[in-house]
Amino acid sequence: MSSKKIVVIPGDGIGPEITAAAREPLVLAARKAGLDLQFTTCLAGGAAIDARGVPLPDDTLAAAQAADAVLLGAVGGPKWDGVAPDLRPEKAILGLRKALGLYANLRPVKVSESLAAYSPLKPEIVAGTDILIVRELTGGIYFGPKCESKTVEGVERAWDTEIYSAPEITRIVKMACQAAKGRRGKVTSVDKANVLASSRLWRRVAAAVAKEEGVEIGNMYVDNCAMQLVLGPKTFDVIVTSNLFGDILSDEAAVVAGSIGLLPSASIGDGPGLYEPIHGSAPDIAGQGIANPIGTILSAAMLLRHSLKAEAPAAAIEAAVDAVLAAGYRTADLYRPGLTKVSTNKMAELIIKQL
Ligand code: NAD
């Protein structure tokens, strides 16, 4: 058996419940692939502020850097809303992203027949949707030169700057192409090349990378993509885009799926990856044992696929989740009459039984 180091950061709110529920399915699936997982639990977010006075203690950072992968619940909550901006719980996630060099954010959005009814879109439009959004995470306008306020000729102005380098574009498009090869082989690169110079470089570099990778690539303007995600989400396979466009489009795509409790995410760089559900710490339901653990369990599947290169156990977890949902089991957030309501732990048990 080969041994892998996993750091678990439960965080705040429902974080401890959902990361606990994800642990056994992860261990079981990994063991079947000959992987022995060694876990270390670390503090971050509000829990770390309470215990250590900072959102990201040095020992958490060191453990994450030395790990093969990090599984995170969620951070934040009303208790820490009043703390100084530099000490806010979400600084922990930004700090981890920076320290681990996580330049790519992967967000799959999958809508099976049994979940199509939860979407705000018509079931026939949304059922069968299976998109992977690959968002550039460390460049672009969020990190470019900015000015908060400057008065020029008596008029107050502010600005942000979108800058992308060819190597930044190359590595993210390459990652999207490689992901597409394990899927339906189609990449859509999203930009605003009719207006932005940075988008024109993006488009040129993306075409060259796709050619080298032998992957079919299409280009789409971001405004059109926003419409097409609602009109025909099934037409997309992999979408690759900049930090700003990806931020907006990935949230739009999440709404198409209908339940934030089900969606996982991965942030990847050259070292350990960070895996977490897309939702927050849900303080309104924390400690009640009713949170949906599926987003975290599917994040654990992504951890196996991307950081441990264990495709079979990742797919096994995803199939187990599909089977449990198809059998009509739901946590409170997705419960409807005629289905079977289960707790966080019961949902995890059912998935483990399927595995
Ligand atoms: P949220 O995602 O925590 O909750 C929004 C709604 O969805 C709530 O009604 C909640 O009960 C429900 N919900 C979320 N996840 C669920 C799950 N797994 N099962 C069942 N229901 C679920 O968003 P929010 O209320 O805007 O934020 C709450 C806190 O989380 C804030 O402090 C925010 O800053 C933080 N937050 C953290 C992250 C992160 O850690 N990555 C992301 C978003 C928000």
Image (cartoon, helix red, strand yellow):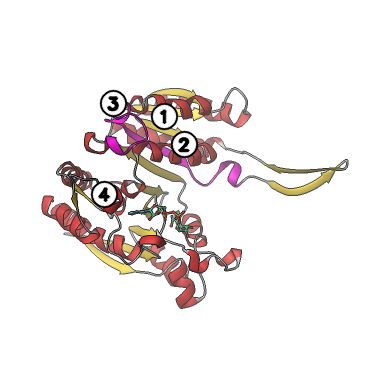
- Please tell me whether residue 109 is drawn above or below residue 1 in the rendered image: above
Point out the tag, 2 or 4, that comes first from the N-terminus. Answer: 2
- Give the SS element for disc 1: helix
Depicted 12 relative to depicted 329: above or below:
below
Name which quarter of the figure residue 18 lies in. bottom left
* Residue 49, horizontal then vertical, whole percent: 49, 72
Q: Is residue 170 above or below residue 262?
A: above
SS at circle 3: helix
Report the residue marked by disc 2. 249
Q: For marks 4 and 1, give the one nearer the viewer.
A: 1
How many other residues sit within 10 Å of disc 4, few (<14), some (14-19) or many (≥20)? many
> How far apart are labels 2 and 4 at the CA level?
23 Å
Looking at the rendering, the quadrant in which ligand 1 lies is bottom left
Residue 120 is a magenta residue: yes
Relative depth, front residue between 226 and 269: 226
- Which of pointers 4 and 1 lies earlier in the amino acid sequence? 1
| Mark 3 Cβ and ligand 1 under 8 Å apart | no
Give whichever of discs 1 and 3 has the lower sequence position.
Answer: 3
331 or 217, nearer to the observer: 331
Whichever of callouts 1 and 2 sits on the residue coming sooner in the sequence is 1
Inter-mark Cα distance, 3 to 2: 21 Å
Mark 3 closeness class: few <14, some 14–19, many ≥20 residues within 10 Å: few
Residue 124 has which mark?
Answer: 3
Q: Which mark, residue 301?
A: 4
The residue pinned by badge 1 equals 229
Q: Which residues are magenta?
A: 116-143
